[in-house]
Image: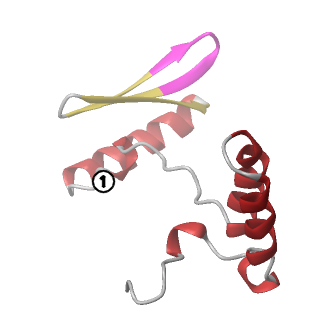
């Protein structure tokens, strides 16, 4: 496990190397880098590896998913399929639902 700070092109960076995984983060001042270095070393010692995991993109809402599907549908679906899907999925209550949480009836 290594957490190092370095100055590069006038900015201070933190470099984390732990179990073959590497991450670099620009932090600003040397004092801030030293403070964050101590915090990261403590977290890694306790086994907290969330810093090294890639960030997951936010899940789209149903409205966002619907919009992208309806934009792409004409290329691969019949007009009737697009028209029916547009009508069936236009319920206002679905707009802000997260699409990953939606499941068919009886599946959960």
For the residue pair 56 and 3, the one nearer the viewer reads as 56
Please rate how many residues cluster around mark 1, counting C-alpha atoms within 10 Å: few if below 14, some from 14 to 19, many from 20: some
- Dominant secondary structure, magenta: strand
- Magenta residues span 6-13
Magenta highlight on residue 5? no
Magenta highlight on residue 12? yes
* Left or right position of 44 against 63: left
Please, is residue 100 above or below residue 72 in the view?
below
Please, is residue 8 above or below residue 81 in the view?
above
* Left or right position of 30 against 85: left
Please, is residue 52 above or below residue 69 in the view?
above
Q: Which residue is most to the top?
A: 9
Q: Indicate the quadrant where residue 93 lies.
A: bottom right
For the residue pair 55 and 81, the one nearer the viewer reads as 81
Residue at 52% across / 16% down in the picture? Answer: 7
Residue at 38% across / 83% down in the picture? Answer: 107
The quarter of the rendered structure image containing the N terminus is top left
Residue ID for mark 1:
43
SS at circle 1? helix
């Amino acid at each position: 496990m290594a957490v190092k700070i370095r100055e590069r092109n006038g900015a201070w960076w933190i470099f984390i190397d732990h179990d073959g995984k590497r991450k670099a983060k620009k932090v600003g001042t040397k004092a801030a880098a030293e403070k964050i270095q101590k915090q990261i070393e403590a977290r890694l010692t306790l086994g907290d590896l969330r810093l090294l995991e890639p960030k997951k993109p936010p899940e789209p809402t149903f409205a966002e998913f619907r919009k992208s599907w309806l934009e792409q549908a004409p290329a691969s679906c019949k007009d009737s399929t697009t028209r029916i899907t547009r009508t069936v999925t236009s319920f206002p209550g679905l707009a802000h639902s997260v699409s990953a949480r939606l499941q068919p009836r009886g599946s959960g």
